[in-house]
Amino acid sequence: MIRAKIAQLALLAAAFAGSLPAHAESGWALLNMTQGVTDISRKIYSLHMEIFWICVVIAVIVFGAMIWSIVTYRKSKGAVADVTLVHNTKVELVWTTVPVVILVFMAVPAARTLVEIEDTTKTDLSIKVTGFQWGWQYDYLDSGVAYYSRLDRKSDAARELLSGIDPTTIDHYLLNVDKPLVVPAGMKVRLLITGADVIHSWWVPAFGVKKDAIPGFVNEAWFKVDTDKPGLYRGQCAELCGRDHAFMPIVVDVRSKADFEAWLKSKAAEQKQAAAPAAAPDVAPAASTG
């Protein structure tokens, strides 16, 4: 009877799998980790999938053995529990050795990837990222360019209570900013991440980067976007940081090296001009009457 039920469940599962739409793969991609647009993000994805399938195989073996034992040695078939077996050295050696081997097999590629994630040497550009309630400040350390990045005004207006604005009419609602972080493709960008008030977290899934922004402490991260992948990439603060935590998105504008250098030069000139004191009026000195 139980075997018949299991067979029926298996048939139902096969029928359900066969009825899935052709775009099921894209649905899986929405649930799974993204492969991203950097070499390190793809390595993280590969490590994730490797560990995932190891866990799947272990689960199939363990739960398969459990289900088979429950079905085969059930009381209704006359099975009687063996109460005399209390110790078996060989079995204990096996269930100790096999998990250790599996853990070592998983730890080696994980350690290799972690070491590469933390390697911030030989970078082409350094940017200081400061999280604050509720936005980000970007400082290009080698050029003196600095600015704040906050939620864009359209999303900010639509999110207000009784605003009367339909959020579905706003492009990338709550995921747009007024000033994105601009970086070049094909260059290794080093981030120095800290916080100004509470703990935040700078997270861009497509780059494989997620680092906490902790007040009084500087975390390091890096990414290098593929040269053929310029465009806008979005992320969010991934650490609960207060009332408006949900309203401090991250947008990174990846440009070609030439476009980035032109933007940086223009931005530096603009900020230099804005910081320059106003020129004194050209007024001739009054003639002395004394």
Image (cartoon, rainbow, N blue to C red):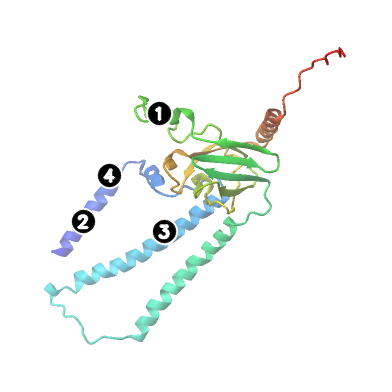
Q: Which of the pair 275/166 is nearer the observer?
A: 275
Mark 1 = which residue?
Answer: 158
Marks 4 and 1: CB-CB under 8 Å? Answer: no
- Residue 283 in which image quadrant: top right
Residue 168 position (above or below residue 30): above
What amino acid does circle 2 point to? Leu
* Residue 171 appearing in the image: no
Q: Residue at x 16, y 73 (%)?
A: 74
**On the picture, is 85 further left or further right than 290?**
left
Mark 3 = which residue?
Answer: 52
Q: Secondary structure at mark 4?
A: helix
Circle nearer the N terminus (3, 1)? 3
Mark 2 = which residue?
Answer: 9
Marks 3 and 2: CB-CB under 8 Å? Answer: no
Q: Secondary structure at mark 2?
A: helix
Marks 4 and 2: CB-CB under 8 Å? Answer: no
Mark 4 = which residue?
Answer: 19
What amino acid does circle 3 point to? Phe
What amino acid does circle 4 point to? Ser
Q: CA distance from mark 4 to mark 3?
A: 25 Å
Q: Nearer the viewer, mark 3 or mark 2?
A: 3
Q: CA distance from mark 3 to mark 1?
A: 40 Å
- Residue 228 in which image quadrant: top right
Q: CA distance from mark 4 to mark 2?
A: 15 Å
Residue 78 position within the rendered picture, expressed as x and y whole percent measured from the top left:
13, 77
- Residue 97 in which image quadrant: bottom left
